[in-house]
Image (cartoon, rainbow, N blue to C red):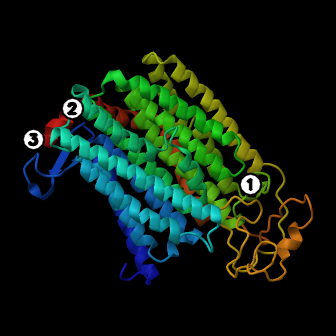
Amino acid sequence: MAVASRTRLVLTVLFAVLVVQLAAAIATVAWVSDGSVVVHQVALWAPGVAIPFVLDMFSALMLTVTSLLTLTCAAFAVPAGEAFKRFYPPLVLLVTAGVNGALLTGDLFNFFVFVEVMLLPSYGLMIITRSGRASVAGVAASRLYISVNLLASTILLIGVALIYGLTGTVNIAELHGAASENTGVAVATALVLFALAIKAAVVPVHGWLARAYPKMSPAVTAMFSGLHTKIAIYAIYRIYAVIFDGDPRYLWVGVVVFSATMLIGVLGAVGEAAPRSILAFHMVSQIGYILLGVALFGPLGLTAGIFYLLHHMIVKAALFLAIGAIEVRYGPRRLGQLSGLAKTEPLIAIAFFASAMSLAGIPPFSGFVAKLSLIIAALDAGQIAAAAVAVAVSILTLLSMLKIWTGIFLGEPTATDSRTLPEGLDPAYSDAPGIPDGRDRAGLDATGDAASGGAATSTVATATAEAGAPDPVMVPPGRRIGLALAAPALALAVVTLALGLGGQVLLELSGTAAANLYDPTGYVQAVLG
């Protein structure tokens, strides 16, 4: 931050750190591939006194995927122009530090601390990456995002305090089985899980995500989609496996709530007309799939859930980056306002199509392996209704992805308008059709009148004044999505294809992670010495 004005130096440091971190994360997967658990007692205090950092296969896999996504989204932010915003690199590294700590800590209070370390710079990223003057909808979405997360963090802290008051510890290993043996601890831990469910956007506390994510900048949306809700999901898996010890008495609640999340999320996408809004609702739906794995608590269910979690993080980021690349070059558009990109933008079309098919569960992509594994696990657990919902939602997901495909990529290319956007106009993220924010930085509204009541003229007003005329697509002639913008989404699309064709490798790693959750004895013994 001290040398924030030296952009080249700061970006070099950012990417050097992220590349080294990704390499180190991959190394941790090899380190614990035999199912071992590695523990470091912070400051070398005695076990039970120290705050432990714990690495097992689950945390190693999460570290690897979060590192990959952070690096990819930062690479996208450079051609998108977001990386050049003052303090963008240090804020990204602060978010990364919070994510790493939350994934590694073996202490509930320390988990809360690292979640806040992750969230505080995230609020800064939301603001500094916004282009031009924020729309009313954008400000409301930011306020909603911050307020909901502050509320959820408060509930989380209260739950952790109650657990400490009842047990005298917040060490996750020391709490092994406490919630299944003591009703009071079960209620306190349920409060923690409720706070995490808010952060994960589980129905019925999901509305904040669907309203907030479409209003963020493209790079930030993609990064948050792979980090924030997924840290909460990781914690739900860990806490239920260790503190509840997989207690079967409460699993039916998860089956009902997570099945409803799958269904309501995909139905919410049906009524949306903006691509990122559709993807945000689908994100809610897919979170239901992921968490169904913990509700099917068993080797098959946990393995399928972990595989689905890792697959979803990659695919959803790829979709947000693909749509983000279109928005960077053409501005935010509703379906039908831009068409024929399959012909004019083949690279981004390939990236979107591959990722969309993976999200819907079409072979040979990773989504097929993920959904098939989860459905088999549901049938094995006797949850026929949940399996049926998963299949039905997959069909609706495919239809929604085809809705975006036909609305943007098919058809004849939209004729570009020779008029460019007025100087300083904010093509940022609001609900208005056509020009998304109807006010430019000089204070002119979409009719060309000054905000104070002046009578300036505008080419935008001329173009849109005709009653019933569709909003023009005002793109400078020859504007195309370059390789630098398309490469991040393409890279993640290749990853989901590789995970589909070589799914057995990730399934085995997920199975190792699931084994440590299903029987956390090794985790507990490693932490407590």
- The quarter of the picture where residue 357 lies is top right
Of residue 336 and residue 456, the one placed in the foreground of this image is: 456
Q: Is residue 128 above or below residue 366?
A: below
Name the kind of residue labelled 1 in the image: Arg
- The quarter of the picture where residue 485 lies is bottom right
The residue identified by callout 2 is: 178
The residue identified by callout 3 is: 529
Give the image location of residue 118, x and y in percent.
37, 59
Residue 504 seen in render = no
Q: Is residue 473 above or below residue 84?
A: above
Quarter of the figure with the C terminus: top left
Instruction: Kindly identify the residue that appears in the image at 56 percent across and 54 percent down.
Output: 213
Q: CA distance from mark 3 to mark 1?
A: 57 Å
Local packing at callout 2 (Cα closer than 10 Å; few below 14, some 14-19, many 20+) is many
Give the image location of residue 125, x and y in percent.
48, 67
The residue identified by callout 1 is: 334
Camera-side mark, 1 or 2: 2
Instruction: Kindly identify the residue that appears in the image at 52 percent across and 69 percent down.
Output: 127
Give the image location of residue 160, x and y in percent.
27, 45
Does residue 218 appear to the left or right of 251 in the view shown?
A: right
Total numbered circles = 3
Name the kind of residue labelled 2 in the image: Ala
Give the image location of residue 233, x and y in percent.
40, 42
User: Could you tell me which secondary element the residue under label 2 belongs to?
Assistant: helix
Q: CA distance from mark 1 to mark 2?
A: 50 Å
Of residue 26 and residue 128, the one placed in the foreground of this image is: 128
Q: Earlier in the sequence, mark 3 or mark 2?
A: 2
Residue 365 seen in render = yes
Q: CA distance from mark 3 to mark 2?
A: 19 Å
Instruction: Kindly identify the residue that appears in the image at 15 percent across and 56 percent down.
Output: 42
Q: Earlier in the sequence, mark 1 or mark 2?
A: 2
